[in-house]
Structure formats: structure tokens, C-alpha cells
Amino acid sequence: MSSKPTSSATTEVWVNTKVCVKFPFEPYECQRIFMKNVVDVLDRKLDAALESPTGTGKTLSLLCSTLAWVQKQKEIKPLDFSTWQSSGAGGAEKTEEKLKNSFIPTIFYASRTHSQLEQVVHELNRTEYKWVKTTILGSREHFCINQKVKKIKESNRQSHVCRGLVSKRACHYYNKFDAMTTDKMNEVLDKGDAMDIEDFVKLGTQNSLCPYFMSRQRSETAELILLPYNYIIDPKMRRRYKLDLKNSIVIFDEAHNLESICESNASAELSSTNIALCIEELKKVLALLVDEEETARAEADMDTEAFGNQKIDLTKKLIENLRTEDLMAVLEKAFLLEEELDKLYESNLLKVSPFHHWMEKPVTEKFFWKLSQSQDSMEIQLNDW
């Protein structure tokens, strides 16, 4: 591997005969080896677990070598617009920018926290690759500048209020963002270095543009996307943010945390108290349903058209969506679940394997979908198990 300094103090490091990495200073030997391994893995399209001693600039080495490899792909895979046009894809359907991204892999750089991702942005801005189109993804809690949403503490409620304001066109930050063309948006975002969340928020505030939706739209054409682990691990998050990992480069920084993150993401917490409360709610719904059935029968015996028919119709709709047998089946399973939990606590077990043979998911899903349609105030989300 040879290297030579450039006039801007950046060092060009040839990790093989094809890829030249522009490093912000003369790299240490361990950094050279690390970058060579990264490029070799990318060339061979392999998965790899790479490590380097603490304090040896892993993030910088990883960024520079990966971005250098992608830059080389741009040079050896020029766009064939004639082939694209002959395939029938119209200009109105795909922009040149999206076409380019379909040929060149997107880099997904994941870390555990947003503060770690901000450090990645800082490192990126030390290099000549800071011009690479980059975005960072996060929740409304981190991005939103609308005071009606910011004052809400719970993230779920923030999302709900935001969606309501957007759907009613009542957020002027979103409205201005939505009215802006992609070219104009890129003009605003490409004026300086790569941006972290704080930069997005500052830019959005100065221009009265929604930082949350700016960062999300930017991800559609970005070459480098910075995001927390769970945005990749959780399929719901991938769908929500339209993250297509196919033919992409996925990097997990500080990957020793990954096992615990996956474990946490796939885990659920249950307590006997919660199950007991659930049972009490089920009993209330059962009593309500029995009462409605009795009322329906009584009304059916009455020959009062003006009063009886309307109530009978409403009751029929309720009973149509919620059967007593369904409710009793789920109630029985809730009792069994409570019993199993008590046994587990008594024996100090950590695994809940006995649930599977009697907790039949289709029954609970069917019942709770019906319950949510007829009695919103008593909706219980057992179906997520």
C-alpha cells in the first residue's frame, strides 16, 4: 500500500491497485490494514466483523475506505442513459439522481445512539468526502420545531399530533417543505458540510422548513444515511422510512452492542399485575356484551318502530363484530397466562416457552380486531404477542 500527501494535507492511500482512499492525515499502519480489509470485503461482497484497538480511528478509517470504494464504483459503472430510455422508463417517473442511486449502493451507517452518529458527522467533515450527499434519520422528538408538537413529552403522541397537523395542512413548516421542489431542497441542504440533527433543526428554523421531513426526503437520494440500529433491525421502521437494504452497504458501528439491541427489540415484558388488569377489563366487556344481547332480545319483542328498530340495528352491529364465544376464549387464555406467569415467578424462570401451546395468535387477533371496532375504550393489544 503506497501513500502520498496532497496539497491540502490530505493523504492519498492506495489500498490496492484500484482504490485510492483520501485520508485527512498520514494514517497509522493499523488504519492502513483496516482500510485494506474494508475494501477487500466490499470488492468480494462479503459480510465481515472488523475490529481495531480503541483510539485507532476506526470510524474515520471505515468512512474513508467505504466512501472511496463507492466513488470508484461511480467511475467504473458510468450511467447508460440510452439503455435506461430504451427500457421504457419515462423521465417523469425517475429523476437522473434516483437513477444514479439505483446503480451505486447506498451506505447505511448505523450506531447505537444519536450522539454517536453526531460524532460520525464530525469525523466525516474532517475529510474530503464531506461533500457526499448525507442525511441522518431520527424521530420527531429530535427534529420537530413546531411548538404544538415539541411541548408534548410522549413520542407516540407527538407522532399522532404531527400527522394530524400535516393531514389538515395546519403546520406551516411542513407546508413550505411540501411546496419546495427537490432541486430547491438540495440547493438549501448542499450549501455546507454534512449535517447532524442540530444542523437540520437550525436550518429548518432559519428557513421555516420541517427538519423531520427534510431528513426523510433526503434519504431517498442520499449516498450515506446515518441512523440508529433499530431503524434497520425493526422491519416496521424500515417500512416506515422506506429503507431498501437490497444491494446496499450496511455498517454497524460499535457492533458489540448489536446482540443486546436485537434481544431487546424482540423482547416483551409482562407482569401478573398487567394480566390481572387485562382480565378485569375483559370481564367488563363480557358483562357489557351479555347486557347488550339481553337488550337486543327485549327490543326484538317490542313492536315500537320509532324507538326499537334503530337501537336493534346498533346492537346487531355490535354483536356482529363481537361474539361472546370469542371473548370467553380470550378470557380463558388470559387466566392461563396469569397462572403461567405466577409459576414462572415462583420458579424464577426467565423463559416463557409454555405459552406457545395454548396462546393461539389467530384467535386473539380475530377477537381484538373486533373489540377495537366496537369498543374503542376497552381495546387491549394482546394481538402484538
Image (cartoon, helix red, strand yellow):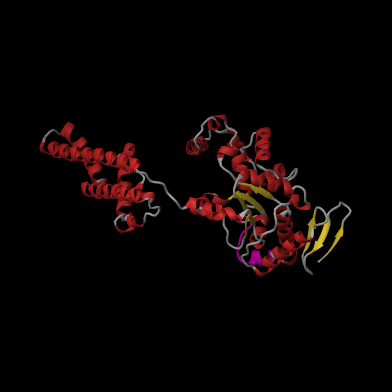
Count of number-bearing discs: 0
Q: Who is closer to the viewer here, 328 or 267?
A: 267
**Residue 242, can we see it?**
no
- In this view, 95 is above or below 200: below
- Residues rendered magenta in the picture: 81-93
Where on the picture, by quarter, is residue 53?
A: bottom right
* Residue shown at the point (62%, 36%) measured from the top left: 176
**Residue 30 visible to the viewer:** yes
Q: Is residue 193 above or below residue 243?
A: above
Where residue 81 sits: x, y (%)? 69, 63
Q: Where is the N terminus found, in terms of image quarters?
A: bottom right
Above or below, 208 relative to 29: above
User: Residue lying furthest right in this view?
Assistant: 7
Residue 319 rendering spot, x and y as whole percentages: 23, 44
The verdict on residue 381 being magenta is: no
Pick whichever, 341 or 319, lies toward us. 341
- Residue projecting furthest to the front: 347
308 left or right, relative to 59 = left
Where is residue 32 drawn, in percent x and y? 77, 62
**Residue 301 falls in which quadrant of the image?**
top left
Nearer the observer, 115 or 300: 115
- Residue 307: percent from the left, percent from the top? 18, 31
Q: Quadrant of residue 33?
A: bottom right
Q: Is residue 323 above or below residue 11?
A: above
Query: Residue placed at 53% from the left, 53% from the top?
Result: 260
